[in-house]
Image (tube, grey):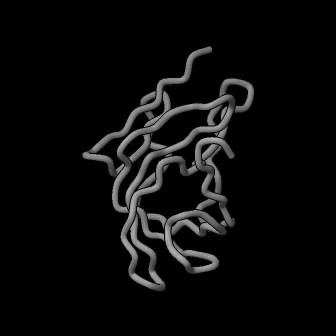
Amino acid sequence: MPIALRTLDDGAWISVNDSRQVSVSDVWTLSRGVFCNCEPAYVLLEGFLDVRVDGSIVFAKTVGQCLECGERASIDRLPVGRIVDGAFKPYDPEAVQSVLEPGD
């Protein structure tokens, strides 16, 4: 069963099957990556640029700002959820996420 993924409202939301599922208003906890030197980094997302599925994982390309050090940067592959039995299951933004770069 195909899943329709897209960004809505100038990148404020990720829509899954025409339902708003993931918002930029959340603070994501990132454990590692090239975002900044904070460990962990608490990143307020500012906008989604793209959304894709790789296997069962849903990734977003996004821009955000670290609340600790103020670094503003883009994230190419932020895992925001997964597809399980044809349904989208979002990840909890407060749970520690690893930024997965291509090749990881």
Q: Is residue 94 left or right of residue 34?
A: right
Q: Outermost residue, left direction?
A: 10
Front residue of 9 and 55: 55
Above/below status of 78 relative to 18: below
Q: Residue 47's image quarter?
A: bottom left
Q: Residue 72's image quarter?
A: bottom left
Above/below status of 43 relative to 4: below
Q: Outermost residue, front direction?
A: 103
Front residue of 67 and 91: 67
Q: Is residue 46 left or right of residue 37?
A: left
Q: Outermost residue, right direction?
A: 85
Q: What residue do we see at 68% from left, 29% from top?
A: 55
Where is residue 29 shown, x and y percent of the image?
60, 69
Front residue of 55 and 19: 55
Where is residue 6 shown, x and y percent of the image?
40, 33
Q: Outermost residue, top direction?
A: 1
Q: Is residue 13 left or right of residue 77?
A: left
Quadrant containing the N terminus in the rendered view: top right
Q: What residue do we see at 53% from left, 47% from top?
A: 77
Q: Is residue 72 left or right of residue 98?
A: left
Above/below status of 102 relative to 31: above
Where is residue 22 shown, x and y percent of the image?
48, 49
Q: What residue do we see at 56% from left, 75% from top?
A: 41
Where is residue 88 shown, x and y percent of the image?
62, 35
Q: What residue do we see at 35% from left, 45% from top?
A: 49
